[in-house]
Amino acid sequence: MRKESTSLSVPIESGLFPDEDNRSAVPLPEGRYQAISQRHLDRIPMLSELSEDERFAIRVVSSVLPFRTNRYVNDNLIDWDKVPKDPVYQLVFPQRAMLSDDDFQTVADHILRGSPDHEISRIAAEIRNNLNPHPAGQLEFNIPKIDGEAVNGLQHKYRETVLFFPSHGQTCHAYCTFCFRWAQFVGDSKMRIAASQNSGLHRYLASHPDISDLLVTGGDPMIMRTSWLERILRPFIGNRMLEHIQNIRIGTKALTFWPHRFVGDQDADELLRLLEDLVDAGKHVAIMAHFNHGQELRTEVVRDAIRRIRDTGAEIRCQAPLLAHINDCPAIWSRMWEKQVRLGMVPYYMFVERDTGARHYFEVPLARGWEIYAEAVRQVSGLGRTVRGPSMSATPGKVEVLGIQEIHGEKVFVLRFLQGRNPEWVAKPFFAKFDPAATWFDHLKPALGQSKFFFEDEFRAMTGNKIALAA
Ligand SMILES: *Cc1c(COP(=O)(O)O)cnc(C)c1O
Ligand code: SF4
């Protein structure tokens, strides 16, 4: 269904099930990446344990939402005797309840009726359009310009940090079922904000001395060959024009989905050398690792990968969304943070699941989210309390739920910006009416007799201007 990029660090199509039609094909060796997608469903031995209904449900849902796993994940990270409750199974395998009953039935009927593929794709696209594929004004407001010209593949929302989406990094070694970037994996061209060239990035950064951080993101940039990463990152070494870029972050889930990227892949050593050269050039290099559950940290190869990254002098900071069915329990978080600290990583963010895709399946009320955070953080050492959250990446900024309080008889959420479109907003506590069912920022109303939030007028002016500019 999807066209694969040709520059993946691993030959996804060619390396996978080499004898496509032979069910007894000899599996590739452990260290070779093998993607598993919808068309391999019948050939995953462990899935034969599931009921016919469950397997059909996977087929239906994966016609609508992106689905990809791989041999490493299936063989090492999932406890198949706990399926379907296993958290990593929930992380990569589509579940029936991820679609509404109506949508599920529509697609199921077409599959059972034997409708042609293009018909099923058309219906799937319609359903996807109703799942808010482009949350939080990502496309409208944050694309920077050089000389009035939009720079593709860049997002500049917060003063000190630029996000870069290289076009070769717009896929992942497996797909998370809750992913908020899911639209780009199903070939939605509106989501294609990716850059096919790096020159715009370097020019934009060189002309903005107030930017200190570059965050390379995706998809997963670690899907790229090292040579592509070098073209993006080597220019930061010994370049006076880019000296103000202090911190280079790379967002990735490869430590979960393909830790061999840092260990046995053919260009793993070059990747580590690149990180080391950046560190030696005085940059702070941070791998922003995405871990949802401690189970993702249990293999020897992920521990090797962590050790090898840390040996380069790069830091690993950990972040993840809070998700029903995967990690909505304090003990999961506290054990995961402890494990991360023990392995030399730094817990960084707990996110609130965004308002897109199958969010109804994964969402956790903000009130419960805060309780989970609070209970979990109380159980770990101060070294694990570097983590902040639960945090919502909303259009005005990253909003953290600091707590729930009663002020003069009114129950409120205490909130603060961790990041704001205006840096002046950051760190000021503000209040919203307590609402036990609220799951996202747009459900919140000002509290304590206020008619609007303190930033509202300014925010409206900002976005209003942006819309006028774009029109
Ligand atoms: C989270 C985020 C950042 C980085 O924020 P930090 O608080 O510095 O980690 C930058 N840009 C965008 C758009 C973000 O969502
Ligand atoms: S690794 Fe990140 S970008 Fe890729 S599917 Fe998971 S959440 Fe989405």
Image (spheres, rainbow, N blue to C red):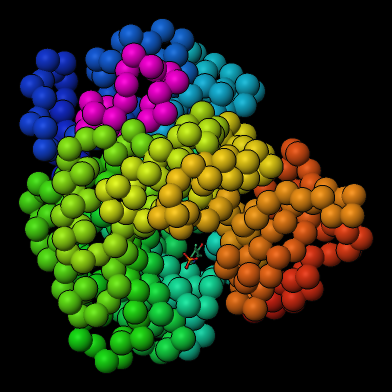
Determine whether, in the image, residue 406 is placed left or right of residue 237: right
Give the side of residue 115 with respect to residue 245, left or right.
right
> Residue 25 occupies which quadrant of the picture?
top left
What stretch of residues is rendered in magenta? 64-89
Q: Nearer the viewer, residue 158 or 304?
A: 304
Q: Residue 11, how many percent across, how many down?
A: 16, 44
The answer to which image quadrant residue 153 occupies is bottom left
Residue 67 visible in rendering: no
Report x, y in % for residue 75. Answer: 23, 26
Which image quadrant for residue 214?
Answer: bottom left
Point out the image quarter for the C terminus.
Answer: bottom right
Q: Is residue 255 left or right of residue 227?
A: right
Residue at image position (89%, 55%) is: 408
- The residue under the point 24% across, 28% down is 76
Figure disc tally: 0
Asked if 57 appears above or below 216 in the picture, the reply is above
User: Which of the pair 246/57 is nearer the observer?
Assistant: 246
Residue at 30% over, 73% down: 284
Q: Is residue 163 above or below residue 160?
A: above
Q: Is residue 113 above or below residue 188?
A: above
- Residue 381 located within the stretch drawn in magenta: no
161 on left or right of 246? right
Return the x and y of residue 43 as percentages of the image width and height. Answer: 25, 18
Q: Which residue is situated farthest in the bottom direction here?
A: 240
Q: Position of residue 38 (x, y in %)?
A: 34, 27
Any part of residue 424 in sight: yes
Residue at horizontal 29%, vertical 62%?
A: 315
| The magenta stretch spans residue 70 | yes
Question: Which quadrant is home to the N terminus?
Answer: top left
